[in-house]
Image (cartoon, helix red, strand yellow):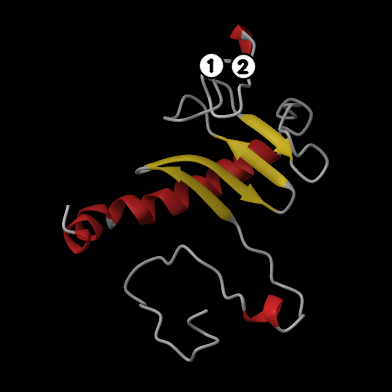
Amino acid sequence: MATAANGHIPRDRPIDGVDLTPALLGRPARHRTLYHYHHWTLNAVRSGPWKLHLPERENGLWEGDDIGQVEPEEDRGKPLLYNIEKDKGERHNLADRYPDKVPELTRLAERFDEEIQAQKSEALKRAGG
């Protein structure tokens, strides 16, 4: 919305948002990797149709999660990979069937999380907390 209003976007930090101008004007949006955080903990990364839940993270998909999904005991601590275009309910873990996707998405997650964690103290100061 800032772009549409000719607003200023800070360049000194990662911005968790997208330019909605293409969607508002009926143009195709460009692909963007999305990162899912709970507080300061990165839990999942989505790129295209793939969503990788990182293992044993705060607010992960284990017992008592928000959607009631419980992974079998033997899957605890393993990455959870879903094709969310075909499996919107994230019920079928495809990590074993697409082993190349797990390290690819893990690398994206680690790089982004390093940027976020490096700016954590400054962000907390700006937020007054």
Q: Are marks 1 and 2 in contact (CB under 8 Å)?
A: yes
Query: Which residue is found at the position 48% from the left and 91% from the top?
Result: 6
- Secondary structure state at the residue bearing disc 1: loop
Disc 2 residue crowd, few under 14, some 14–19, many 20+, Cα 10 Å = some
Disc 1 residue crowd, few under 14, some 14–19, many 20+, Cα 10 Å = few
- Secondary structure state at the residue bearing disc 2: loop
In this view, the residue in front, 104 or 67, is 67
In this view, the residue in front, 97 or 7, is 7
In this view, the residue in front, 111 or 18, is 18
Q: Above or below — where is 105 with respect to 97?
A: below
Q: Position of residue 55 (x, y in %)?
A: 52, 27
Amino acid type at circle 1 is Glu
Direction from residue 33 to residue 90 in the image, left or right: right
- Number of callouts: 2
Query: Which residue is found at the position 62% from the left and 38% from the top?
Result: 52
Direction from residue 81 to residue 1 in the image, left or right: left
On residue 33, which mark appears?
none
In this view, the residue in front, 118 or 92, is 92
Query: Which residue is found at the position 68% from the left and 33% from the top?
Result: 81
Amino acid type at circle 2 is Val
Q: Quadrant of residue 91?
A: top right
Marks 1 and 2, Cα distance to the nearest angstrom? 5 Å
Give the residue number, with chain letter if any, for mark 2.
Answer: 70
Direction from residue 87 to residue 73 in the image, left or right: left
Q: Above or below — where is 76 with respect to 5?
A: above
Q: Earlier in the sequence, mark 1 or mark 2?
A: 1
On residue 63, which mark appears?
1
Q: Position of residue 56 (x, y in %)?
A: 47, 24
Query: Which residue is found at the position 72% from the left and 84% from the top?
Result: 25
